[in-house]
Image (tube, rainbow, N blue to C red):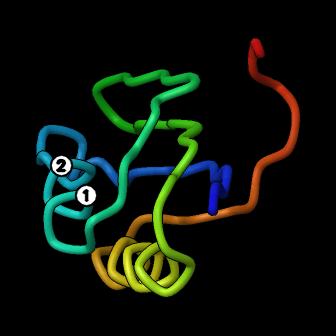
Amino acid sequence: MKKRVKLTFPQQLIKEPVIFMMAKEYNVIPNIRRARVTETVGEMVLELDGETADIEKGIHWLKEKGIEVEMAEGDVIE
């Protein structure tokens, strides 16, 4: 299954490898479709590939870390 999400990172997590950690822990393959990072905020559109349960667990983990997760449609180059 593939799911496209928009992530908004709080300032304290911008430099942390949270996408790597989520991918490794929950066996999810992330494909970065768009990203914008400043000193105060990070935004990223990801396509997550994997088993439905693994993707949902990974998304839940990101939310627990304080990352805002929204479902994303469009707004990326195919």
Which dot marks residue 72? none
Give the image quarter of residue 42.
top left
Quarter location, residue 57: bottom left
Callouts 2 and 1 close, C-beta under 8 Å:
yes
Left or right: 60 in relation to 45: left
SS type, badge 1: helix
Q: Around disc 2, counting alpha carbons within 10 Å, would you say few (fewer than 14), some (14 to 19), or many (20 or more)?
A: few
- Foreground residue among 64 and 12: 64
- Res 78 quadrant in image: top right
Task: Give residue 60's position: percent from left, percent from top.
Answer: 44, 84
Q: Position of residue 47 (x, y in %)?
A: 57, 43
Q: Residue at x 50, y 53 (%)?
A: 49
Residue 41 appears left or right of 3: left
Decide: is 75 above or below 56.
above
Question: CA separation, marks 2 and 1?
Answer: 5 Å
Secondary structure beneath label 2: helix
Instruction: Measuring from the top left, give residue 71's x and y in whole percent.
Output: 74, 60
- Image position of 62 with respect to 35: above or below: below
> Considering only vertical position in the picture, is 32 above or below 50?
above
Amino acid at dot 2: Phe
- Answer with left or right where residue 73 lies relative to residue 50: right
* Outermost residue, top side: 77
Residue wearing tag 2 = 20
Where residue 70 appears, as percent x and y from the top left, is 69, 62
What residue is shown with label 1? 23
The answer to whether residue 18 is left or right of residue 74 is left
